[in-house]
Image (cartoon, rainbow, N blue to C red):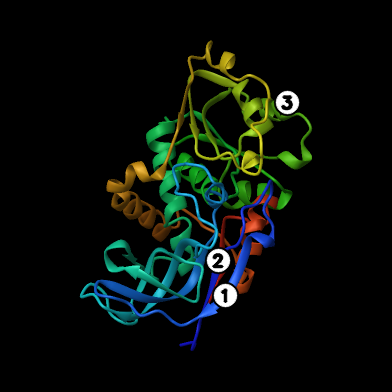
């Protein structure tokens, strides 16, 4: 064990795109767990786009951080000290902890990790919150049917890469938008997408969709928003379903941007647009985890993580989400 505990604090609210000035690393004592709690040595830390919303002083589905708060996120780690009968020292667990070397978690709020199913970072991605978001968002909101065309924006990210693979497992044609040739190659060559569009190298998204989705779009899983979504809305088929999971293209906007008015495009196809929050499916997390775990075990569902080394680099890992540095899930490795 370290003799001290490093923690990242929220230093100031950003205007527009955040930078390192919003983060402050402090060092203090290793905390002691109370009754029902666990002291966990953090092995991997998750950074996620939704955290940008928590930096705003505004009500949202995720409670905003106050300046001076310790930053929080998903972690995978090893129990060092247990004040609960549910876990003992040496157990591997995942839960919502702090950006730190050591984190205190309530034993009732963590889940065990089976390293024989997948390596530890996967429990912050495909076998964690992003995987469950993809599972319920696609199957419950998107309701894909065999033979339909599913389009995914942000397809090479933690959520989008799972959405596309689950859609393929359900017999769909899958098209993904991603931001580099390396990413689009990964989608088509490794994950089985039928087509992928490098949006950074494409001038006309509508024309690209004509080639990639010649039969139109039945399900659109939106992680991005912006011009990609504007283009997809012009290709929606009769009774199309749109699952709005994220809008990372707008997370750093200080004012709501005005783009093409999309609502008229929903009338003729009688399309449905629905936002989704993974917390709404909390009572069914076990169902998703079991199925995702089976698919990973059989090799039907592949996963990839971009690993940034060192707690000191956690802010850079978070900021890299907005420049598309990651392929798959972005995680920070804290300890061996």
Which residue lies at the image location 28% right of the left edge and 68% below the top edge?
A: 107
Front residue of 220 and 94:
94
Q: Secondary structure at mark 3?
A: helix
Judge whether 136 appears above or below 301 on screen: above
Q: Taking 253 as reference, is 39 left or right?
A: left
The answer to whether marks 1 and 2 mark residues whose Cβ atoms lie closer than 8 Å is yes
Q: Residues within 10 Å of mark 3 (few under 14, many from 20)?
A: few
Q: Quadrant of residue 151?
A: top right
Looking at marks 1 and 2 on the same chain, the residue that comes earlier in the sequence is marked by 2
Q: Which residue is mark 3?
A: 207
Q: Which residue is mark 2?
A: 9
Front residue of 262 and 289:
262
Judge whether 250 appears above or below 156 on screen: above
Q: Secondary structure at mark 2?
A: strand
Give the spatial CA distance, label 3 vs label 1. Answer: 51 Å
Q: Which residue is mark 1?
A: 26
Give the spatial CA distance, label 2 vs label 3. Answer: 46 Å
Q: For residue 170, say whether it is visible.
A: no
The answer to whether marks 3 and 1 mark residues whose Cβ atoms lie closer than 8 Å is no
Q: Taking 84 as reference, is 65 left or right?
A: right
**x, y percent for residue 174:** 55, 37
Judge whether 263 appears above or below 10 on screen: above
């Amino acid at each position: 064990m370290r003799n001290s505990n490093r923690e990242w604090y929220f230093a100031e609210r950003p205007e527009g795109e955040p930078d390192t000035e919003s983060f402050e690393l402090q060092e203090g004592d290793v905390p002691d767990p109370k009754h029902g709690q666990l002291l966990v040595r953090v092995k991997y830390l998750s950074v996620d786009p939704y955290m940008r919303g928590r930096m705003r002083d505004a009500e949202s589905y995720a409670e905003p951080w106050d300046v001076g708060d310790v930053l929080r996120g998903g972690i995978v780690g090893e129990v060092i000290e247990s004040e609960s009968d549910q876990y003992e020292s040496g157990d591997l667990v995942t839960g919502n902890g702090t950006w730190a070397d050591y984190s205190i978690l309530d034993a009732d709020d963590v889940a065990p990790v089976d390293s024989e199913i997948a390596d530890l970072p996967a429990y912050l991605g495909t076998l964690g919150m992003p995987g469950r978001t993809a599972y319920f968002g696609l199957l419950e909101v998107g309701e894909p049917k065999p033979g339909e065309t599913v389009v995914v924006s942000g397809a090479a990210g933690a959520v989008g890469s799972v959405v596309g693979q689950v859609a393929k497992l359900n017999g769909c044609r899958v098209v993904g938008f991603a931001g580099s040739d390396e990413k689009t190659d990964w989608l088509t060559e490794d994950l089985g997408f039928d087509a992928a569009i490098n949006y950074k190298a494409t001038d006309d998204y509508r024309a690209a969709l004509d080639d990639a989705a010649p039969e139109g779009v039945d399900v659109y899983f939106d992680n991005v928003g912006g011009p990609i979504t504007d283009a997809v809305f012009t290709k929606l088929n009769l009774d199309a379903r749109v699952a709005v999971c994220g809008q990372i293209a707008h997370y750093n906007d200080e004012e709501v941007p005005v783009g093409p008015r999309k609502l008229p495009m929903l009338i003729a196809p009688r399309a449905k647009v629905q936002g989704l929050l993974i917390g709404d499916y909390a009572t069914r997390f076990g169902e998703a985890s079991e199925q995702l775990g089976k698919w990973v075990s059989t090799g039907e569902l592949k996963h990839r993580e971009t690993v940034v080394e060192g707690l000191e680099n956690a802010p850079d890992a978070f900021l890299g989400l907005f420049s598309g540095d990651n392929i798959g899930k972005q995680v920070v490795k804290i300890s061996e």
